């Protein structure tokens, strides 16, 4: 295996002299070839697994490095799981394992994968693997490969808030919604970037039925929330009840800093009381790009099932807002950890939390402090011993075909 020390500037890796083919044993080795400047791997059996490999020495722990590579595929149905690029750090105790590269944009037949990451403690080198696996027949070409030291990326800081508040004996939907808006009277514009309110803020405390309070979107409730968002210069998420013709939905809305509606999510998993109460389930998991990051939403009973949060994360969500009536905080923490996302719960009957991608509660609202604000870094990578960058590992090693 060839080793080489690279200059601090981003530099191209020579092909093919510095690369070797690798497989666990000859019986499961795919076919390796060089096509011009591209490294090709072709598999003919589901048991085939191999990689083009290069070892680089002379790296320094605590410094930031970037690897980028272009992936082109043919005959693969799940390229993100089958044609995988990773860094494997060589440490003094050999304790840090893979950091996987993820697509820089929408994945297609020719996709650039990249990773910018700090070398972990004890680093003395790195092994780059460009691999193919889990396919009964298909080809990947790896080219445009570059690796080198780069400046550390700037933090992606966001101030995220959750709310604990339950109106009682109000005059109707407008009064209940207004009671949430009043909570923020003392909050200065720019103090937060995103706030999540609970489920059903237009019905709680009113004594009315879903049909009594269901409204069009945009409508009175989104207008009130839009005014709040515009005053705070913050994104606002909340759960209300939506009417479309004869149908009703338990809907989460996302309002932008300008007060306009960004998008909605219709609760997909309905408990029996909501189905009996006339609700129709939604059937999609939209994710919305904002100046904070990519935001998805789910509502209450959705949290009981792993699929909604998983689908939102697979669709690119970095933050999941969850208006919820009540439930299990353990599940909320699990959904954040297993999908490596920030998750915000706002509730009447359970903990109102901001949970980080390791499942840790970093902000919690209660009766004495009805608004809790947590500053988070959406660009922070969280390594786990023997796992590496957990966020990349979750998606690279997941079996979506099953």
Image: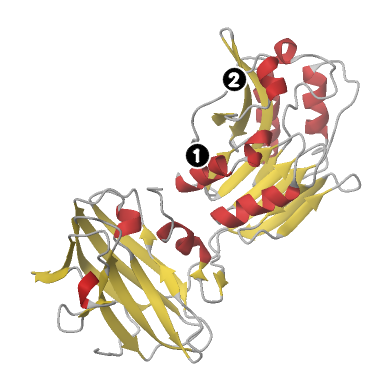
Residue 16 sits in quarter: bottom left
Left or right: 263, with 361 as reference point: left
Specify the farthest residue to the front.
27
Question: Helix or strand or loop: what does disc 2 sit on?
Answer: loop
Picture quarter with the N terminus: bottom left
Tell me, yes or no, whether the two marked residues, 1 and 2, touch with CB atoms within 8 Å. Answer: no
Q: Position of residue 387 (x, y in %)?
A: 51, 71
Q: Position of residue 152 (x, y in %)?
A: 48, 73
Residue 174 sits in quarter: top right
Which label is found at residue 362?
none
Q: CA distance from mark 1 to mark 2?
A: 17 Å
Which label is found at residue 288?
1
Please tell me which residue lies in front, 213 or 279. 279
In the rendered image, which residue does mark 2 sit on? Answer: 218
**Residue shown at 42%/61% (left/top)?**
397
Q: Position of residue 117 (x, y in %)?
A: 46, 72
Please tell me which residue lies in front, 109 or 182. 109
Please tell me which residue lies in front, 6 or 87. 87
Left or right: 117, with 239 as reference point: left
């Amino acid at each position: 295996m060839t080793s080489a020390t690279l200059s601090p500037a981003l530099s191209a890796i020579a092909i093919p002299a510095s690369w070797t083919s690798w497989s666990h044993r000859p019986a499961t080795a795919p076919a390796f070839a060089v096509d011009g400047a591209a490294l090709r791997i072709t598999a003919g059996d589901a048991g085939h697994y191999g990689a083009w490999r290069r070892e680089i020495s002379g790296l320094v722990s605590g410094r930031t490095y970037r690897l980028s590579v272009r992936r082109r595929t043919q005959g693969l149905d799940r390229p993100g799981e089958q044609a995988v690029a990773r860094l494997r750090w060589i440490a003094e105790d050999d304790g840090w394992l893979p950091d996987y590269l993820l697509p820089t944009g929408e994945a297609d037949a020719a996709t650039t994968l990249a990773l910018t990451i700090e070398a972990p403690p004890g680093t003395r080198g790195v092994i780059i693997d460009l691999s193919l696996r889990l396919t009964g027949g298909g080809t990947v070409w790896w080219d445009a490969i570059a690796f080198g030291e780069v400046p550390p990326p700037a933090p992606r800081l966001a101030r995220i808030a959750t709310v604990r508040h339950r109106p009682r004996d109000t005059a109707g939907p407008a009064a209940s919604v207004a009671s949430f808006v009043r909570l923020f009277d003392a909050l200065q514009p720019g103090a937060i970037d995103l706030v999540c309110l609970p489920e059903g803020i237009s019905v709680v405390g009113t004594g009315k039925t879903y049909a009594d309070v269901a409204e069009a979107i945009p409508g009175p409730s989104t207008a009130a929330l839009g005014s709040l968002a515009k005053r705070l210069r913050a994104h606002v998420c909340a759960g209300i009840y939506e009417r479309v013709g004869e149908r009703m939905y338990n809907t989460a809305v996302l309002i932008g800093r300008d007060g306009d509606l960004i998008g909605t999510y219709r609760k997909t998993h309905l408990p029996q009381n909501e189905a009996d109460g006339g609700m129709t389930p939604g059937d999609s998991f939209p994710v919305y790009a904002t100046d904070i990051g990519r935001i998805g939403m789910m509502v209450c009973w959705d949290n009981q099932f792993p699929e909604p949060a998983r689908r939102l994360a697979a669709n690119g969500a970095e933050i999941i807002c969850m208006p919820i009536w009540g439930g299990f905080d353990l599940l909320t923490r699990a959904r954040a950890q297993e999908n490596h996302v920030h998750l915000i719960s706002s509730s009447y009957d359970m903990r109102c939390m901001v949970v980080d991608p390791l499942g840790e509660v970093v902000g919690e609202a209660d009766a004495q402090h009805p608004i809790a604000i947590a500053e988070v870094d959406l660009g922070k990578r969280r390594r786990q011993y023997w796992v590496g960058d957990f966020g990349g590992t979750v998606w690279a090693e997941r079996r979506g075909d099953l």
